[in-house]
Image (cartoon, rainbow, N blue to C red):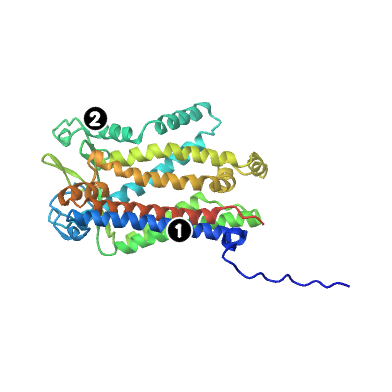
């Protein structure tokens, strides 16, 4: 009769770090980490030694000095007497503005073009294919120049809106498209406007909650609730009621021609429009292919089963196909959003004051602090890229398919 017992535990020896597979991978990773730290330390020490030899030092005190230059379009108050730090902050806001606008519009273009590329209509399908092939195979720099040329050379000057028989006229008496940009009505905020805005935001949240509830009810019970008209009602009715009850705290200031330019309203400069639309249509072509690939990755049997249940094509796309296609669409979509953010640095070409033009351009040339400015630029783009990746990865985890 024999008895089974646990094998005796072998004592640890240094040779096991290389000979034992349990420790070998840890050993190699530790060696790689040490080599990486040593390389970074050597490069940094070499940099500081060279700077000290030339009588230079890394300092960010220049951020507190006067900028001494104007910026044509700002989201916050700014003048030439402001500090370099505020000029850099203006550039950051301008970069985020064009990045957000371009991401939203590129997504709209991409989703529409991607869905229409699979249309049964031959003409629509080919037109979308032409759009994708043309716009994604021409550098975005060329599109920025083309749109900027159209805005500055083909659009009329503000003086064309003058006279008894003007050569150009405002659209609906409120919108003016000129070679200096587009003039639109701007909101005038009075006491109580925050309540109206909060109601509007709550309405958006309510629409999302209602649509999720209707989708869950459909999956659980098969009961199909109307979605379009209830969403429209939630979108408009609460906000309008609060708007009138609060005494119309939000009004509009319309642009009007005064002298040789428009006064009042809000001006969207030609550089911003050129950069915004160029990034949108260029990246939208790539997103369209991502959307098409995601839709085609969903089994055709899913659509056929949904059609057999009596769902309309629009419902099939929204409730069956797109939710499953998102697991294929989201990962490459992250890269496209990152490309938009980084390609926005081309704004300096058309005179749009983003962070590269302010901190990495004018401020760098005036102060001579190249290392500090470049390090700050790297930190900004790295931070924004990591935030975008984090948000979309969290969303990707939320919409991915889960196995039972």
Spatial separation of the CA atoms under disc 1 and disc 2: 58 Å
Q: Which residue is mark 1?
A: 33
Residue 187 visible (yes or no) = no
User: Where 274 sits versus 204, above or below?
Assistant: above
Residue 257: image x %, image y %? 15, 41
Compared across the picture, whether 94 is left or right of 135 comes to left
Residue shown at the point (59%, 46%) measured from the top left: 320
Q: Is residue 296 above or below residue 251?
A: above
In the rendered image, the vertical position of residue 246 relative to residue 178, given as above or below: below
Q: Nearer the viewer, residue 301 or 88?
A: 88
Q: Quadrant of residue 302?
A: top right
Quarter of the image for residue 219 reads: bottom right
* Quadrant in the picture for the C terminus: bottom right
The residue carrying pointer 1 sits among few (fewer than 14), some (14 to 19) or many (20 or more) residues within 10 Å by Cα, namely few
Query: Can see residue 105?
Result: yes
Tag 2 residue: 154
In the depicted view, which residue is nearer to us: 374 or 69?
A: 374
Toward the viewer: 15 or 183?
A: 15
Asked if marks 1 and 2 touch (Cβ < 8 Å), the reply is no
Quadrant where the N terminus is found in the figure: bottom right
Left or right: residue 357 versus residue 69 is right
Q: Residues within 10 Å of mark 2 (few under 14, many from 20)?
A: few
Return the disc, 1 or 2, that comes first in the chain's sequence: 1
Q: Position of residue 145 (x, y in %)?
A: 28, 33
């Amino acid at each position: 009769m024999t008895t089974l017992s646990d094998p005796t535990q072998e004592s640890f020896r240094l040779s096991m770090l290389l000979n034992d597979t349990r420790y070998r991978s840890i050993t190699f990773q530790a060696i790689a980490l040490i080599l990486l730290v040593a390389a970074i330390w050597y490069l940094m020490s070499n940099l500081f030694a060279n700077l000290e030899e030339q009588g230079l030092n890394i300092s960010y005190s220049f951020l507190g000095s006067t900028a001494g230059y104007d910026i044509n379009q700002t989201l916050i108050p700014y003048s030439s007497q402001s500090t370099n730090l505020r000029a850099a902050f203006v550039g950051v806001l301008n970069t985020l503005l064009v990045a957000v606008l371009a991401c939203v519009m590129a997504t709209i273009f991409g989703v529409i073009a991607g869905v229409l590329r699979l249309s049964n209509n031959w003409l629509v399908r080919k037109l979308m294919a032409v759009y994708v092939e043309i716009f994604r195979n021409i550098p975005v720099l060329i599109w920025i120049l083309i749109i900027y040329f159209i805005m500055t050379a083909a659009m009329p000057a503000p003086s064309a809106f003058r006279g008894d028989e003007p050569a150009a006229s405002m659209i609906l008496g409120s919108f003016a498209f000129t070679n200096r940009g587009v003039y639109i009505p701007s909101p005038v905020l009075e006491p109580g406007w925050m309540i109206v805005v909060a109601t509007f935001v709550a309405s958006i949240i309510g629409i999302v909650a209602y649509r999720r509830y209707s989708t869950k009810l459909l999956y659980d019970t098969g009961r199909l609730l109307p979605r379009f008209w209830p969403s429209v009602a939630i979108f408009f009715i609460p906000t309008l009621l609060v708007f009138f009850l609060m005494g119309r705290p939000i009004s509009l200031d319309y642009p009007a021609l005064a002298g040789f330019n428009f006064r009042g309203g809000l001006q969207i400069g030609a550089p911003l429009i050129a950069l915004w639309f160029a990034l949108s249509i260029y990246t939208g072509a790539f997103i369209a292919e991502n959307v098409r690939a995601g839709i085609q990755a969903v089994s055709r049997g899913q659509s056929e089963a949904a059609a057999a249940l009596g769902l309309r094509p629009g419902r099939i796309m929204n409730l069956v196909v797109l939710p499953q296609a998102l697991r294929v669409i989201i990962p490459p979509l992250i890269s496209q959003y990152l490309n938009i953010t980084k390609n926005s640095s081309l704004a300096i070409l058309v005179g749009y004051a983003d962070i590269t033009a302010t901190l990495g351009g004018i401020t760098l040339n005036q102060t001579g602090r190249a290392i500090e400015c470049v390090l700050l630029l790297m930190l900004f783009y790295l931070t924004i890229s990591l935030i975008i990746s984090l948000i979309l990865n969290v969303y990707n985890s939320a919409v991915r398919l889960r196995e039972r």
